Image (cartoon, grey):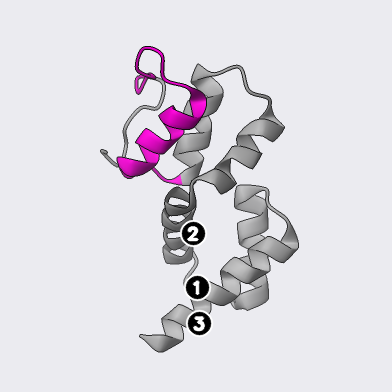
Amino acid sequence: MAIHADFAKETPKKGETSVEYGARLEHEGARELYLRKALRTHFDLTLAEVIDAGSNYPEARHRELVALRQRFPDLNENRFAWRITKSLTISKEDALVWSQTILAAETED
């Protein structure tokens, strides 16, 4: 998937459900926010449903968080968790777990 692909042009295949479409985009390398925008564009989902859908695509979420960390490499655990919460609209608790996991992986390298 191209980095600057247009989610409006990345249409679902005939008969493809929102779950199948999201899984295909995830498999093709989409990040979570791209996937959310594509789902919202092509399916009649509420904003809450689109936000919830993000947790169903862990590889897309991981790619989103890695990109977020690259944009903000100097944030400490709590500030990075805050950034995750604001960017992905997920709970502070979930964001803190992701922040701790990513920062722990950085120290292992």
Taking 6 as reference, is 88 left or right? right
Q: Is residue 49 above or below residue 42?
A: below
61 or 72: nearer the eye? 61
Residue identifier under label 3: 104
Tell me which residue sits at (60%, 78%) in the image.
76
Residue 91 in percent (x, y) is at 73, 56
Sort mark 2 into few (<14), some (14-19) or many (20+) by Cα contacts within 10 Å: many
**Nearer to me, 69 or 32:** 32
Q: Which residues are magenta?
A: 9-31
- Give residue 45's position: percent from left, percent from top: 63, 23
Q: Earlier in the sequence, mark 2 or mark 1?
A: 2
- Mark 2–mark 1 contact, CB under 8 Å? yes
Check if residue 13 falls in the magenta segment.
yes
Q: Residue at x 58, y 70 (%)?
A: 99
**Residue denoted by label 1:** 102
Asked if the residue at tag 3 contacts the one at tag 1, i.e. Cβ–Cβ closer than 8 Å, the answer is yes
